[in-house]
Amino acid sequence: MKYINDCYYLIKVQYLGFRYHGWQKQPDVKTVQGTLEKTLKFIFRHTEFKTLAQGRTDAMVSANEAYCHLITKQPYAIEGLLSDLNKNLPQDIRVLDVQETDANFDIIQAAKIKEYHYLFSHGQRNHPFCASLITGKNSVLDIELMKQGAKLFEGKHNFKKYTKRATRSTVFEREVHTSQIVANNLYQANFFPKESFIYKVTGPGFMRYQIRIMMGTLFLLGSGELSIEAVKKTLTHWDDDVVLNEIAPASGLILYKTIIEF
């Protein structure tokens, strides 16, 4: 869909994904893109626009910094668009910034590095309010062993076992720049457990469920159900019979940051 004299805007947005069925607009379910476009329709009083995201988040996944490219037939003042969006969007979606771009800007190619965080705790039952952000494991996990396991994912590997619903065009060799587990000193609330952790992962791109399966594998490692050698094998012998079925819950995953190059 192209318009004569198109106007282009880059919108930086953050959202709590707990009550959304992912980013991408779908019929009969509430999504972040669908809610954003409904709000834009109300503001613009027309539907001659389209939105395109840097990537898609799954159901219940949140974003601290995500980007959306807006193409519309009529110009709109940046300050007014920022203000009007935040005035009309629901409380669990917030626009952080709006910039003008042009027809040469490709949001898919511009998203160079993505950083994801996965929040988790262990050894106790969490307050119910944590459910939208933190995955709580009742059993005690071997965090130090999980830290060792996380480092195995760094570098270029064949992550064929770490995705679902692959197609013939899926590229399984991916590069992970950093993969580490650290103490959570970033996300805080008075109902959070006294101790929690962040699994931080950065890279140029990830497959469907890849990070959640990586996290699920680390949970198995920390609970003694998987060994370090077994984790190594999943990355070097991807054609064997080992199947990774542990997919960590979506609500613990946050798209923390995306580095955009213009």
Image (cartoon, helix red, strand yellow):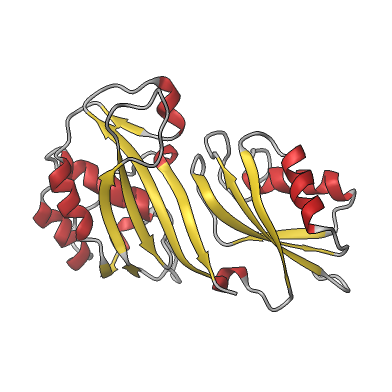
Q: Please name the residue shown 56% across and 54% down the image.
A: 66
Relative side of 74 to 257, left or right: right
Q: Which of 183 and 3 is in front in this view?
A: 183
Q: Please name the residue shown 41% across and 24% down the image.
A: 190
Q: Is residue 182 above or below residue 172?
A: above
Q: Which of 124 and 29 is in front in this view?
A: 124
Q: Does residue 165 show up?
A: no
Residue 49 on image: x %, y %? 80, 59
**Total marks drawn?**
0
Q: Nearer the viewer, residue 116 or 218?
A: 116
Q: Quadrant of the N terminus?
A: bottom right
Q: Does residue 130 show up?
A: yes
Q: In which quarter of the image is the C terminus?
A: bottom right
Residue 187 on image: x %, y %? 41, 38
Q: Quadrant of residue 160?
A: bottom left
Relative side of 238 to 23, left or right: left
